Image: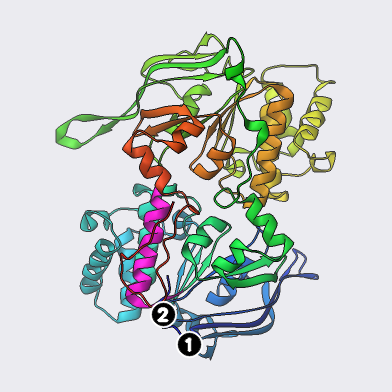
């Protein structure tokens, strides 16, 4: 990763000294500290990873470094120097002059960071116009050239697109293009790939590596994925409750951590940990007969797409898909974005119609056009990827969990409060959260509420659509422990949809691999990971963070000189 010459001590591009930050509560009368006495530095060509749980202060440090602290945030002490000059206390106009050159920032959420009414080419061109003093036409051409440089195909046409018309990986490339338009010396990347599947994530991070080598960038890489930190950084700073608990060269910290907190983070990280979940081992092979709970035969889901004079073309989200899922197993569905995973989940849950084939849930065939109220809701429930988007923000936790009981008229009105409390206890939450709304509880608690809502109907099957992708590794580990405990106690069957292949390897008993709506491979988990047969599966497994070394040796600057190990 680094271009720093051995033995040389170049001055830091970023020097953070004893930084402390606090936030005001809603009434503005009380403040609470979130970052306390944090110090680190970054030199040209060096990548420093900030790691820690949600709430550890990672993003607050990024916001302080880039002048983007919210109004209720305040620097209580310390210094931040960029290219040797102090930047704390600068007015917004001065910050605007800094951002782009020498400072660049890649935020976590690309869709939320782009103006939905502005074409992406205009967004990148504006960066050129601001930092290079180019005329509009020249800035537009430079923007197209830069979009090509960051690997966007048909860049001239894509530049005319609005954000919602591009994929997550393409949007992240647009943000990278805008960030480097001013030839920065420092790049702050705040969880730049957290919402991307492993192959797109790999491509985006390779792009940042290449740009770093070309521009000799210093990179502050903020991530909760320790496997990515291992692959992509020279040194690591570990944060816990706003304080540094451990720091050092990446290989030293993540191979032989000294602090108990760092050790726990590594234990919880699927890409680094050797931990296996004994409860997830499938013992169905030892049983004489194994009941099939889900049977899919020749399933196709077609989205019509009009292309003007060419008429109507078919976009097959699912293409003659056939698979079976056995009772008591954890059956993982994996594949890149757009492979059909979520479409399959919605078909199984009776939320999306399908065009061809047969789908049976617990022996009952699903209608191709699902009714308004799903008749199979008591057998199968779907747990969504983003609980904040799936839970009505106006409802209390009590009402959220009770709603399916009301809809299906299960239990008497007097019994339902007890069922709600019992569902909460099953997921490890107390009655104290009953009157709170989704925004008043943490991300991990929201996911537990979503699981409790699904359990209220006592289903046999849970379809889990990326249930931990938005959670840090420690919260993720707790949710997985919870799910496995529930499976053991209630004999549940899980359809586990994920792009986290490290986690799939730890918990799944069987794996099915989808590519563009087609099933390319299905087998027991050990067989898939030990000897994948399909080239697409092989490519997916090669992208798992933590299983290879992609960092360049110190002093090397080749854009493609990567080392890989198994």
Q: Main secondary structure of the magenta part?
A: helix
Task: Depth check: give the residue in front, 124 or 488.
Answer: 488
Highlighted range, magenta: 199-218
Q: Nearer the viewer, residue 52 or 417?
A: 52
Residue 536 to residue 68: above or below: above
Left or right: where does residue 460 sit relative to residue 108? right
Residue ID for mark 2: 185
| Residue found 50% across the figure and 22% down from its top | 348
Q: Which residue is mark 1?
A: 83
Q: Quadrant of the N terminus?
A: bottom left
Pointer 1 and pointer 2: residues touching (CB < 8 Å)?
yes
Q: Position of residue 489 (x, y in %)?
A: 74, 25
Q: Is residue 99 above or below residue 507?
A: below
Q: Tell me where residue 7 appears, x and y as whole percent.
A: 46, 87
Q: Position of residue 445 (x, y in %)?
A: 71, 44
- The quarter of the picture where residue 180 lies is bottom left
Query: How crowded is the residue under tag 2: few (<14 C-alpha within 10 Å), some, or many (20+)?
Result: many
Viewer-closest of 487 and 524: 524
Asked which colour scheme the image uses, the reply is: rainbow
Sequence-wise, which precedes: disc 1 or disc 2? 1
Mark 1 closeness class: few <14, some 14–19, many ≥20 residues within 10 Å: some
Q: For the residue labelled by badge 1, is the local secondary structure a helix, a strand or a loop?
A: loop
């Amino acid at each position: 990763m680094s271009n720093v010459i051995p033995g040389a001590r170049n001055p830091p591009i970023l020097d953070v000294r004893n930084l402390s930050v606090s936030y005001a509560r809603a009434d503005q009368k009380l403040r609470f500290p979130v970052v306390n006495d944090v110090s680190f530095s970054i030199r040209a060509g060096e990548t420093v990873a900030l790691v820690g749980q949600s709430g550890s202060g990672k993003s607050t440090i990024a916001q302080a470094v880039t002048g983007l602290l919210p109004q209720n945030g305040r620097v209580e002490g310390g210094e931040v120097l960029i290219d040797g000059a102090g930047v704390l206390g600068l007015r917004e106009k001065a910050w605007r002059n800094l951002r782009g050159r020498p400072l660049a920032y890649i935020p976590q959420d690309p869709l939320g960071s782009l103006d939905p009414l502005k074409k992406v080419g205009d967004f990148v061109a504006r960066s050129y116009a601001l930092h290079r003093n180019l005329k509009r036409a020249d800035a537009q051409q430079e923007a197209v050239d830069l979009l090509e440089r960051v690997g966007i195909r048909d860049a001239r046409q894509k530049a005319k697109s609005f954000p919602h018309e591009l994929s997550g990986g393409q949007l992240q490339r647009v943000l990278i293009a805008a960030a480097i338009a001013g030839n920065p010396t420092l790049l702050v990347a705040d969880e730049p790939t957290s919402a991307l599947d492993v192959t797109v994530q790999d491509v985006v991070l390779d792009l940042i590596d290449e740009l770093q080598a070309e521009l000799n960038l210093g990179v502050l890489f903020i991530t909760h994925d320790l496997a990515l930190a291992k692959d992509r950084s020279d040194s690591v700073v570990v944060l816990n409750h706003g304080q540094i608990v451990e720091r050092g060269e990446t290989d030293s910290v993540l191979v032989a951590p000294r602090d108990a907190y760092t050790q726990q983070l590594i234990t919880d990280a699927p890409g680094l940990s050797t931990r296996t979940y004994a409860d997830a081992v499938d013992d169905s092979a030892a049983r004489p007969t194994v009941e099939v709970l889900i049977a899919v035969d020749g399933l196709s889901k077609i989205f019509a797409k009009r292309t003007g004079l060419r008429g109507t073309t078919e976009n097959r989200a699912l293409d003659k898909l056939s698979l079976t899922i056995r009772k008591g197993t954890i059956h993982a569905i994996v594949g890149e974005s757009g492979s059909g995973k979520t479409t399959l989940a919605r078909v199984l849950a009776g939320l999306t119609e399908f065009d061809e084939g047969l789908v049976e849930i617990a022996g009952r065939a699903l209608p191709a056009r699902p009714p308004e109220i799903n008749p199979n809701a008591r057998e199968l429930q779907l747990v969504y990827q983003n609980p904040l988007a799936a839970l009505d923000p106006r409802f209390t936790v009590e009402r959220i969990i009770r709603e399916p009981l009301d809809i299906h008229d299960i239990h008497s009105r007097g019994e339902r409060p007890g069922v709600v409390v019992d569902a909460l206890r099953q997921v490890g939450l107390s009655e104290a959260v009953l009157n709170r709304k989704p925004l008043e509880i943490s991300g991990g608690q929201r996911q537990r509420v979503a699981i409790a809502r699904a359990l209220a109907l006592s289903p046999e099957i849970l379809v889990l659509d990326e249930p931990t992708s938005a959670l840090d590794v420690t919260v993720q580990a707790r949710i997985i422990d919870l799910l496995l405990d529930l499976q053991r106690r209630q004999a549940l069957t899980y359809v586990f949809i994920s792009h986290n292949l490290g986690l799939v390897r730890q918990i799944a008993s069987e794996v099915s691999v989808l590519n563009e709506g087609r099933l390319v491979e299905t087998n027991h988990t050990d067989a898939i990971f030990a000897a994948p047969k399909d080239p697409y599966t092989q490519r997916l497994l090669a992208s798992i963070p933590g299983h290879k070394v992609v960092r360049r040796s110190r002093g090397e600057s080749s854009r493609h000189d990567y080392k890989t190990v198994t």
